[in-house]
């Protein structure tokens, strides 16, 4: 159960990151320093293989195809980058390889150190590309898949590689398959603490009431808070939250924004009327937009963007209890 929860949460985080990157795609922005961390490329590859397994195994078999998935992962140093972006890159390459093997075949991921770079290659035994297609395949919106393709897959891969100051090569032969090679630079400093900007846990334990009708969100938030020593109780709606607040003191309320009958903002107003000093943090998928607009509803002390990460949760708690 924990494995699937982890995969679902990782997929949600990556989806949020993809949406953000699509908005920024035409601007070709550089990576923000606060988004960087030291990451293990082999670990990201294994995560991506596991997350895409339904496509290359279950769905492929359902259509009568057999995909043989092979790996040759050599020991690698850490690289500096965005984990979700690299998983996005790998996911696009895997899906492209699957599309190129309509009758089945072998998909191979290899890694090794090549000079000052980590070299990652994705090879398929599919239809391959003509030289004309190979020359154009990185162009945004260029696709050979008709209405089924967006033409953004390899263009996004190229953009991610560029933002990581890497290199991208494509080798292909019609009828024999394609190999995509990604080279990402190896930093000289392999000390994770020097690129980590995550705030430390609060010095004291909090008693937190989490209000959300999505069980998965509740379990993830509870796991994050509990790992820092906080005591957590969960209710699924505003009415249950108000009833629970009458029976015991809490240090913090974390509430979803969109809930039936009473929203998170409305709940915050009632909480303020009853317990003016009890801080309320609003959890919402529109958190980034609200922060950019400077929109903070009445009696909301902090805004937490969904999907929630341990780092953003800690940062928001630090802001609220430092204020």
Image (cartoon, rainbow, N blue to C red):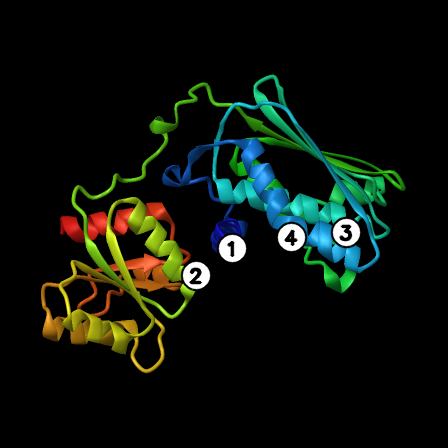
The answer to whether residue 145 shows anywhere in this view is no
Mark 1 or 3: in front is 1
Name the residue rendered at 55%, 35% in the picture. Answer: 43
Q: Earlier in the sequence, mark 2 or mark 3?
A: 3
Residue farthest toward the right in the current orientation of the protein: 175
Q: Badge 1: few (under 14), some or many (20 or more) residues near its Cα, within 10 Å? A: some
Measured in 3D between alpha carbons, the distance from the residue under mark 1 to the one under mark 2, in whole angstroms, is 9 Å
How far across and down, in percent of the image, does residue 171 sit?
78, 33
Name the residue rendered at 34%, 49% in the picture. Answer: 224
Tags 1 and 2 in contact by the CB under 8 Å rule? Answer: yes
- Circle 4 residue: 152
Q: Secondary structure at mark 3?
A: helix
Drawn side of residue 202 relative to residue 236, left or right: left
Q: Earlier in the sequence, mark 1 or mark 3?
A: 1
Name the residue rendered at 27%, 40% in the picture. Answer: 199
Name the residue rendered at 47%, 23% in the picture. Answer: 187
Q: Earlier in the sequence, mark 4 or mark 1?
A: 1
- Circle 1 residue: 8
């Amino acid at each position: 159960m924990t494995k699937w929860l982890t995969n679902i949460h990782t997929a949600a985080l990556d989806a949020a990151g993809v949406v953000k990157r699509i908005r920024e795609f035409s601007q070709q922005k550089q990576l923000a320093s606060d988004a960087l961390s030291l990451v293990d490329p082999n670990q990201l590859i294994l995560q991506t293989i596991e997350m895409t397994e339904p496509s290359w195994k279950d769905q492929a078999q359902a259509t009568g195809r057999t995909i043989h998935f092979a790996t040759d992962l050599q020991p690698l140093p850490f690289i500096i980058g965005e984990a979700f972006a690299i998983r996005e890159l790998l996911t696009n390459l895997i899906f492209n390889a699957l599309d190129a093997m309509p009758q089945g075949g072998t998909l191979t991921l290899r890694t090794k150190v090549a000079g000052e770079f980590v070299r990652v290659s994705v090879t398929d035994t599919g239809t391959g590309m003509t030289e004309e297609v190979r020359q154009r395949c990185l162009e945004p919106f260029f696709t050979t898949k008709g209405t089924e393709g967006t033409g953004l897959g390899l263009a996004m891969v190229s953009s991610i590689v560029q933002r990581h100051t890497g290199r991208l090569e494509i080798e292909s032969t019609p009828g024999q398959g394609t190999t995509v090679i990604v080279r990402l630079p190896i930093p000289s400093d392999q000390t994770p603490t020097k690129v980590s900007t995550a705030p430390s846990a609060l010095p004291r334990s909090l008693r937190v009431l989490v209000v959300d009708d999505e069980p998965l969100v509740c379990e993830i938030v509870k796991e994050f808070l509990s790992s820092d020593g906080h005591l957590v109780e969960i209710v699924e709606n505003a009415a249950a939250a108000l009833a629970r607040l009458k029976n015991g003191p809490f240090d913090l309320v974390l509430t979803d924004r969109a809930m039936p009958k009473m929203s998170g903002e409305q709940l915050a107003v009632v909480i303020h009327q009853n317990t003016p000093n009890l801080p309320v943090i609003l959890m919402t998928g529109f958190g980034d937009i609200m922060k950019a607009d400077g929109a903070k509803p009445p009696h909301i002390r902090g805004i937490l963007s969904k999907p929630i990460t341990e780092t953003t949760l800690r940062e928001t708690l630090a802001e609220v209890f430092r204020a």
